[in-house]
Image (tube, helix red, strand yellow):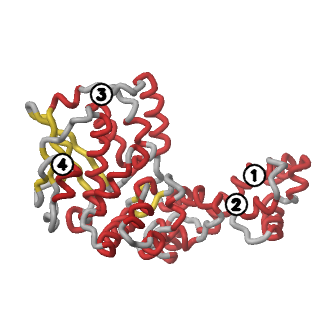
Amino acid sequence: MTDLIRSASLTHYAEIARSVGIDPRAMLKQARIPLHCLESPDLRVAVGSVRRLLEASAEAAGVEEFGLRLAERGGFSALGPVALVVREQATVGAALEALARYIQIQNEAMRLEIDRRDDLVTIAMFLRGGPQRATRQSRELALGRIHRLMVSLMPADWRPLEVHLAHAPPLRRTYHRKFFGCDVTFDSEFDAIVCHARDMHRAIPTAQPMLASYVENRVKEIGARPEHWDGKVRELMRVLLPGGNCTIETVAEHLACDRRTIHRRLRECSTTFSTILDAERADIAMRLVEDGNRPLKEIAGLLGFSAQSALARWFRGRFGCSITDWRGGGRRRAMMAARW
């Protein structure tokens, strides 16, 4: 299955791209990432597409530290729903353990390991695909955001003891040294941050541990992901339909494949794109039509219809009555008829 990452990972991408002289919209199109992902932080896109975007952006701008520049602006918002759990933990150690447990809700290709030995703690990061597929920019962005998270939880004068990156050093190391606050070891065996074990016991003053278990349960619900292609397609449709951009081409872009692949995978699940789309439209339509003040033209757009008349034909064919009849009390009759 294609690894996905939430669009929150691209928080501030457009701003950083413009600051180094490249067009963010053009770069997104080149990487086959839908433009509206910048306004929809929970939208999931293919990890491979984001990696290509970061690498191409760094090359186009001639900026070796592009990933770190993006990490510098990320903050908690770049973690998406995972931030809800992390920020409510009582200590820095508990926050990092929560991050390790739930990071795959944000980035399915990422894994964290926390190793405690004597007086040192190593937070090691692993990206699926290894050095050949996990590019320099994606590794630096990911490790840079972990570092920024730690900085936000520590006293103002905190610095890591060591930082390790698995790729070759840049031509100039000044930005990396300034960003991490210590020397960086390149060509290392793994990507990691090393700090004192006592740092893990630091309390987080703003945390509300009483909320932690509730928030954790909520994040588990958010992170639940279908295992099969029909579930993946359905999940994307729920996000794309209200924006009026739910075509098979758009879904294919998000899953980093072509439409033929989607058709083939859905056949293996004994369904079709049109069948799933029709069911999701019906589910959303019932909620929208219940609002008698919502214009039909607006509903048509939210369901991906180009005209109100197309919505009317589809609705009658699906529910056996007009929208006016439905709103006038025909809903129960239509649903009873559908059962029989």
Name which residue type carries label 1: Leu
Alpha carbon of mark 1 to alpha carbon of mark 4: how far? Answer: 48 Å
Helix, strand or loop at mark 3:
loop
Alpha carbon of mark 2 to alpha carbon of mark 1: how far? Answer: 9 Å
Name which residue type carries label 2: Leu
Alpha carbon of mark 3 to alpha carbon of mark 1: how far? Answer: 44 Å
Q: Which residue position is annotated with label 4?
A: 192
The mark tally for this picture is 4
- In the displayed structure, does residue 11 sit left or right of residue 321? left
Q: Which residue position is annotated with label 1?
A: 288
- In the displayed structure, does residue 137 sit left or right of residue 322? left
Q: Residues within 10 Å of mark 1 (few under 14, many from 20)?
A: some
Residue 180: percent from left, percent from top: 21, 48
Q: Residues within 10 Å of mark 4 (few under 14, many from 20)?
A: many
Q: Which residue position is annotated with label 2?
A: 302
The residue that appears at 84% across and 52% down in the rendered structure is 334
Name which residue type carries label 3: Thr
Out of 175 and 85, give the one closest to the viewer: 175
Q: Earlier in the sequence, mark 3 or mark 4?
A: 3
| Label drawn at residue 91 | 3
Helix, strand or loop at mark 4:
strand
Q: Residues within 10 Å of mark 3 (few under 14, many from 20)?
A: many
In this rendering, the label closer to the viewer, 3 or 2? 3
Q: Earlier in the sequence, mark 3 or mark 2?
A: 3
Q: Earlier in the sequence, mark 2 or mark 4?
A: 4
Quadrant containing the N terminus in the rendered view: bottom left
Alpha carbon of mark 3 to alpha carbon of mark 2: how far? Answer: 44 Å
